Image (cartoon, helix red, strand yellow):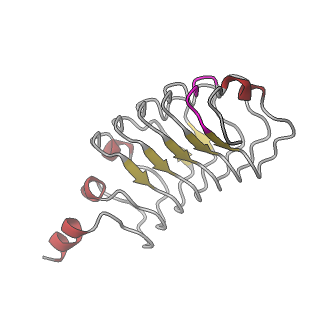
């Protein structure tokens, strides 16, 4: 009975000490912030094609592997983790993504094709990482980007690829 109440009524599982979340949780929960999650169960996410928003912020996640099956996802919140690497095609299935928040992580670099399939992305937050430089073409696919947050990184110069962002209104 407790299990039915938990799964039937809550879509937010926040501020717990979960180390691992099963598929059953993921089918019903969109907010999994402030837990102790260390990795994303790629297989569990693959069956969540209907999900439009996913909040995995303020966990202990260190890397982003290829996240397949999230083709309806519009918002992905990964801020406040320990992410230090993103696989090159990790976000490829998220062509409907509008908002991606990666601030307060430990990213030092971004793969050149990391945003390749994110043509609908409008808001990208990369603040408070350890980015020292960005490849010229990393932003090329983001023709619809409106807001880009790069503050509090180690960038010495503005990335050349900013010129590709014709719709950018906020930097």
**Residue 68 at x, y percent in the picture:** 38, 35
Horizontal relation, residue 32 to residue 63: left or right: left
Task: Using the rendered image of the protein, determine whether residue 127 is visible from the camera's viewpoint.
Answer: yes
Q: Verify whether residue 141 appears in magenta.
A: yes
Whether residue 158 is in magenta: the answer is no
Query: Relative to 67, is 37 above or below?
Result: below
Q: Is residue 92 left or right of residue 115?
A: left
Tally of numbered tags = 0
Instruction: Label the magenta part by its dominant secondary structure.
Output: loop
Horizontal side of 149 relative to 79 (left or right) equals: right
Vertical placement of 134 versus 147: above or below?
A: above
The stretch in magenta equals: 140-146
The x, y position of residue 9, in whole percent, is: 22, 69
> Residue 42's quadrant in the figure?
top left
Return the x and y of residue 140 as percentages of the image width and height. 63, 23
Question: Is residue 144 shown left or right of residue 32?
Answer: right
- Height in image: 156 above or below 95? below
Residue at left 42%, top 30%?
95
Q: Could you tell me if residue 135 is visible in this image?
A: no
Above or below residue 95? Residue 28 is below
Q: Residue 158, percent across and down?
A: 81, 35
* Towards the viewer: 115 or 84: 115
Q: Among all residues in the image, which is located at the extreme right?
A: 156
In front of the other: 136 or 145: 145
Q: What residue appears at the point 39 percent right and 60 percent down from the top-left corner?
A: 31
């Amino acid at each position: 009975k407790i299990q039915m109440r938990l799964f039937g009524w809550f879509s937010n599982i926040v501020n717990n000490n979960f180390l691992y979340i099963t598929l059953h949780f993921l089918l019903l929960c969109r907010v999994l912030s402030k837990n102790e999650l260390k990795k994303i169960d790629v297989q569990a996410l693959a069956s969540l094609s209907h999900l439009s928003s996913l909040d995995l912020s303020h966990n202990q996640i260190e890397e982003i592997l290829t996240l397949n099956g999230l083709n309806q996802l519009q918002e992905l919140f990964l801020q406040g983790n320990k992410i230090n690497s993103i696989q090159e095609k990790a976000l490829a299935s998220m062509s409907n993504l509008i908002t991606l928040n990666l601030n307060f992580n430990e990213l030092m670099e971004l793969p050149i094709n990391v945003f390749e399939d994110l043509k609908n992305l409008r808001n990208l937050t990369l603040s408070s990482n350890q980015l020292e430089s960005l490849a010229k073409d990393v932003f090329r696919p983001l023709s619809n980007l409106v807001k880009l947050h790069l503050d509090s990184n180690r960038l010495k110069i503005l990335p050349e690829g900013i010129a590709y962002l014709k719709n950018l209104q906020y930097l």
